[in-house]
Amino acid sequence: MRHLILAVAFLSGCTSVVPTGIARLSAVSPMEADPADIAVALSLPTGIGVTTNSANLNLMASRTDTDQSTAETYVLASMMGSDGSTIYAVAPADYARLRDQQALIRQWKGENSKATSGSLGVTLEPCTTGAGPTPDATVTIKIRTSSDGQFFPILRNAPVTDVLQQGNFRPIQSCP
């Protein structure tokens, strides 16, 4: 089972959600954004890791007037950020496929925007290292929506326990 790490919807009442970051994120169209520009920076506490090869971007859309749907999963490659965070970005091998899916959904919206809906999500499988996180451990999530842009926070110093409880996640296993 995958865990939705961008659990902002679950934490809408949480003081860790950064309203200006959410506003900036809502202004970005997943259908227009260049896949090469989008990246997520995840700052995890000691004791929490991410299972290797578990990070994915999921893009889904459907049309109620034609009963068509599209659902794709794209690998997110990871690298270390200069601030110690882990940065996840769409793997270059998936750029063309994601651009093709974006074009299809844009076409559907152009043909009948009221009948077209979709969702975008990022999933990761968290795992524990050592003794696991301390009870007061926090997580910060930042997003970059343009290759020359800065990362901006959407969740800042959110208690890990709140993220896991609000998302109704199963217990986290030890990292392999």
Image (tube, grey):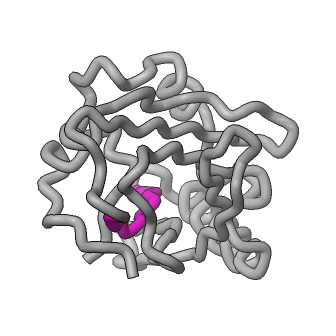
Residue found at the very far right of the displayed protein: 148
Horizontal arrangement in the rendering, residue 142 relative to residue 12 (left or right): right
Q: Is residue 81 visible?
A: yes
Compared to residue 60, the image places residue 71 above or below, namely below
Closest to the observer, 44 or 119:
44
User: For the N terminus, which image quadrant?
Assistant: bottom left
Horizontal arrangement in the rendering, residue 175 relative to residue 97 (left or right): left
Closest to the observer, 92 or 44:
44
Horizontal arrangement in the rendering, residue 74 relative to residue 97 (left or right): left
Count up the numbered dots: 0
Residue 29, percent from left and from top: 61, 44
Horizontal arrangement in the rendering, residue 124 relative to residue 167 (left or right): right
Closest to the observer, 71 or 19:
19
Magenta stretch: dominant secondary structure: strand
Residue 88, percent from left and from top: 62, 59
Specify start and end residues of the magenta stretch as a single range. Answer: 117-128
Residue 135, percent from left and from top: 20, 38
User: For the C terminus, which image quadrant?
Assistant: bottom left
Compared to residue 14, the image places residue 160 above or below, namely below
Question: Is 19 covered by the magenta stretch?
Answer: no
Residue at the spot x=43%, y=62% of the render?
49
Q: Is residue 118 visible?
A: no
Compared to residue 173, the image places residue 140 above or below, namely above
